[in-house]
């Protein structure tokens, strides 16, 4: 299992960094893991999906409040290409085919900003 942790800092200066410290995010990764459940959320506050996987990997947590270490969040409102729905389609294809995945996370999102936010997904 690969473990990657880094602090993302800004060049705004020491005073600005002190103000931003609570929002500084960690990155993490896990894999290979097997998807055991996909859960879709369609709520006014957040729209996305949670991938639950095994084995749990503490390296994916990013200091988020959910500490099960077996969930990552896909944000459907994420802009860019690929977007959150593309990542979900990839996760669904891997789950359906029984393929393992590698995930990389950055920061926290989802319900109460408590789940590690997925930034990449690789089907193995």
Image: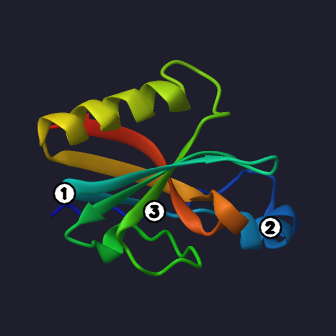
Which residue lies under the disc numbered 3?
A: 6
Label 2 crowd bin: few (<14), some (14–19), many (20+), radius 10 Å: few
**Residue ID at (32%, 38%):** 91
Residue 47, located in which quarter of the rendered image?
top right
**Residue ID at (26%, 59%):** 30
Secondary structure state at the residue bearing disc 2: helix
Which residue lies under the disc numbered 2?
A: 14
Measured as percent of width and height from the top left, residue 78 is found at 63, 33
- Separation (CA) of disc 1 from disc 3: 22 Å
Measured as percent of width and height from the top left, residue 25 is found at 60, 62
Q: State which mark lies toward you, 1 or 2.
A: 1
Secondary structure state at the residue bearing disc 3: loop
Q: How is the image coloured?
A: rainbow
- Separation (CA) of disc 1 from disc 2: 39 Å
10 to 58, vertically: above or below: above
Q: Earlier in the sequence, mark 3 or mark 2?
A: 3
**Residue ID at (70%, 53%):** 10
Measured as percent of width and height from the top left, residue 77 is found at 68, 33
Q: Earlier in the sequence, mark 1 or mark 2?
A: 2
Which residue lies under the disc numbered 1?
A: 33
């Amino acid at each position: 299992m690969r473990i990657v942790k880094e602090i993302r800092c800004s060049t705004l200066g020491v005073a600005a960094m002190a103000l931003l410290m609570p929002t500084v995010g960690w990155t993490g990764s896990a894999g290979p893991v097997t998807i055991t459940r996909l859960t879709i959320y369609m709520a006014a506050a957040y729209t996305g999906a949670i991938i639950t996987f095994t084995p749990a990997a503490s390296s994916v947590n990013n200091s988020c409040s959910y500490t099960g270490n077996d969930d990552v969040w896909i944000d459907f409102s994420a802009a860019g290409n690929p977007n959150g729905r593309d990542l979900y389609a990839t996760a669904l294809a891997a789950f359906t085919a029984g393929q393992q995945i590698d995930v990389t996370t950055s920061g926290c999102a989802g319900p109460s900003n408590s789940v590690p936010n997925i930034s990449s997904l690789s089907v193995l």
